Image (cartoon, helix red, strand yellow):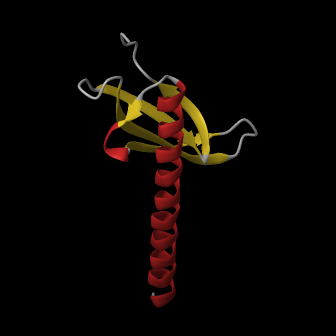
Amino acid sequence: MELVLMLALVLAAWFWLDSLGKRERAILLGTELAARYSLQLLDETVACNKLWLSRNTRGHVQFLRRYEFDVSANGLDRLHCELELLGDRLHTWHIPPYQQ
């Protein structure tokens, strides 16, 4: 029983640390996407709102995480955006149309 509990704690710690790393990657990618379109990442943060399993191009199962973030063209407006990470790679992203 102790072995099962220890294994559960190790897996939980690994998942937590892995999630922190993926969140930092999502912040970096969100910043790069915003800069590509002359936008500013607001609050310098992202929020993971969905997590599920998916297969990559090689057929391996990985976590697919969807992150939401806000950007602004002029500092007064807010555009709601999202990106998805499959493992640690950018899978999809969406920035809505805006007027410059």
Most extreme residue toward the right is 58
Most extreme residue toward the front is 74
Most extreme residue toward the top is 99
Most extreme residue toward the left is 76
> How many numbered marks, from 0 up?
0
Question: Residue 55, located in which quarter of the rendered image?
Answer: top right
Q: Does residue 19 appear left or right of residue 71 in this picture?
A: right
Residue 77 seen in render: yes
Q: Residue at x 54, y 36 (%)?
A: 32
Q: Position of residue 16 (x, y in %)?
A: 45, 65
Residue 45 seen in render: no
Question: Which of these two is toward me, 25 or 75?
Answer: 75
Asked if 44 appears above or below 70 in the picture, the reply is below
Asked if 68 appears above or below 15 in the picture, the reply is above
Q: Does residue 60 appear left or right of residue 28 in this picture?
A: right
Q: Position of residue 80 (x, y in %)?
A: 32, 27
Asked if 1 appears above or below 89 in the picture, the reply is below
Question: Which of these two is toward me, 15 or 20?
Answer: 20
Q: Residue at x 52, y 79 (%)?
A: 7
Q: Residue at x 50, y 22 (%)?
A: 37
Q: Quadrant of the N terminus?
A: bottom left
